[in-house]
Amino acid sequence: MAVFQALFYLIAIVLLVAAALPHSSRRSRGVGLALLAAAFALTAFAAPTFDAAF
């Protein structure tokens, strides 16, 4: 389970960095990436709960 949690935290960090970079397209793209990163971080944070439930 620790590998799953670490992988999801790593994905969240990469998405947050991508959301922070300036884009020439719409500004809402960064917000979408930041929300996706938050979802990955929350999933990684809740991973021990998933492990305990199953």
Image: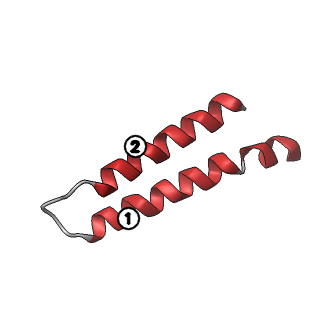
Work out how far the residue at label 1 is from the one at label 2, CA to CA, in angstroms: 13 Å
Q: Earlier in the sequence, mark 1 or mark 2?
A: 2
Crowd class of label 2 (few under 14; some 14 to 19; many from 20; radius 10 Å): some
Residue pictured at 48% horizontal, 47% vertical: 12
> Under tag 2, what secondary structure?
helix
Query: Could you tell me the amino acid type at mark 2?
Result: Val
**In the displayed structure image, the side of residue 40 where residue 3 appears, left or right:** right
Would residue 34 be found to the left or right of residue 49 on screen? left
- Residue 47 in percent (x, y) is at 72, 45
Task: Please name whichever residue, 53 or 38, is drawn nearer the observer in this view of the structure.
Answer: 38
Count numbered badges in the picture: 2
Image point (55%, 51%), residue name: 40
Residue at 29 percent of width and 71 percent of height? 28
Residue position marked by numbered label 2 in the rendering: 14
Q: Name the spot of residue 49 as percent of width and height, x first.
A: 80, 49
Q: Say what secondary structure mark 1 lies in.
A: helix
